[in-house]
Amino acid sequence: MDTLVNLYQGFAAVLTIQTLLVIFLGLVAGLLVGALPGLTATMAVAVLVPVTFGLSAVPALSMLLAIYVGAISGGAVSAILANTPGTPASVATTLDGYPMARLGKAGRALGLSLMVSIIGSLIGITALILLAPVISQAALRFSAPEYFALAFFGLTMVVGISGRDLLKGVVSALLGLYVGFVGLDPMMGVQRFTMGNMNLLGGFSFVPVLIGLFAVSEVLYQATRMGEARPALQAVRNVLPSIRELLRHKWLLLKSGLIGTGIGALPGAGADIASLVSYNEAKRSSKHPEAFGKGSEEGLMASETANNAVIGAAMIPLLTLAIPGDAVTAVLLGAMRMHDLRPGPLLFTYSEAEVFAMYAALILAVLMLRVVGLFMVRVFARVMNLPKRFLLAGILLFSFVGSYALASSFFDLGTALAFGVVGFVMLRFGYPVAPLVLALILGPLAEDRLRQALVMSGGDWSILVTRPISATILALAVGSLVFAFRQQRLIARMQESVDDDATKT
């Protein structure tokens, strides 16, 4: 009852003209930034923190939270239309979102992503409001062995997203591990694979690599197919799915939202990992796993539900433990301190009104997303009607601008171009890009946490299986790996049967 009363008071605090206006502006800015490759949610929040200097705490934080909501949701736009995730959180969305667009279902894909983004966000916010103490205590028990187990669990998904040729998927993943290990050794400070280039001491910047692999490579690949007829585009009207359609997938949405919430509550895990884990789980439990990667609505919904659920969940360790759940909440931590709020156990004692106002602002931003996002969906879906040469040129321009703007670095621009060529070669020879990205994200995390775990145990590897949580996660990882192998063989047999029938016909 106290929670409901406090939430009511939180809504009373944000339902002012000033706060509603800044929420609206923040949401629009977030959607635009999220839709443009390279301009991440973290960048948007960080750039606009100084704008909030003249605002009081409630409207200032409401604006920043609205940007967060808009950017994560907006990342699906370029993932679907241009095969490049607007934010790292939408990596898994490209796997089925872009194939849907190429099948003439761009509007449908955008509408689905919008609605499940709202559902996922509300699941995460509900967990934030009701379960913050419980989940934060569970996350506090995680140490290096548990984080290694989680990263290893994620790496086992390479089998599930490699397609029919597992060997090519493994090669792609190994390339991702190599790229992820470039730079200084995190514990010894020794240079690794830098080839004497000072720009690589900190490793490759993730966003330019992502832009190159997904956007530039696709531009190069499509440029070789300019003469081919484009698929007929779906009309932009009626892009939103009906309630009945969403209810058909209610268990998928609930499961994906809970996965996003659980992973988002772990400091440092992030929406990219949540979306990949949710995507793999959706494929594992689907009645039609062979459709994944070819325009599966289930894959799209799983990814977008999970990454948006992270928004509320990542706030749990931030508010209760003063530990940022991801890069965006790290910026929010600084913004809260700038406005004389001190996240941690005492925050709910001394600043309870501001906390519930933040909850209310998150809910209002998500509800506004239904209207604002619908308008943006219609605008961006029509981009697909542009002549192909103009569309490709625009994607390439935004890709290069986004790569350079991240750190005003020509080296990052060259990185995007170089990985664009790598991605193009992989596309031409049938090597999947997703395992590379997965290994690039999880490889360094797994290495770092494994070495920390061995330091904790004095070099004793048994620490990974003697701690209950890490042992459980590793067991689940092995089980998932075995299941994925069996599932892949089943899919391969089904595909061979289809091919044989087609040959006989």
Image: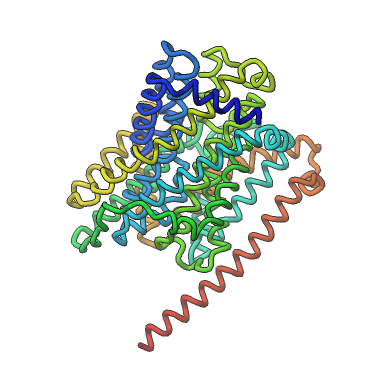
Way the structure is coloured: rainbow
Q: Is residue 200 above or below residue 393?
A: above
Q: Is residue 400 visible?
A: yes
Left or right side of 495 for 485: right
The N terminus: image quadrant: top right
- Comparing 287 with 2, the one in front is 2
**What residue is rendered at 45% in x and 37% in y?**
366
Q: Is residue 58 above or below residue 393?
A: above
Q: Is residue 280 visible?
A: no
Determine the image quadrant of residue 398. top left
Q: Is residue 156 above or below residue 78?
A: below
- Comparing 410 with 165, the one in front is 165
Determine the image quadrant of residue 78. top left
Q: Position of residue 209 (x, y in %)?
A: 42, 41
Q: Is residue 31 above or below residue 50?
A: below
Q: Position of residue 261 (x, y in %)?
A: 59, 42
- Comparing 41 with 221, the one in front is 41
- Tell me how many marks there are: 0
**What residue is rendered at 53% in x and 46% in y?**
306
**What residue is rendered at 34% in x and 32% in y?**
28
Q: Position of residue 17 (x, y in %)?
A: 38, 20
The C terminus: image quadrant: bottom left
**What residue is rendered at 69% in x and 22% in y?**
345
Q: Position of residue 155 (x, y in %)?
A: 59, 51
Left or right side of 412 for 328: right
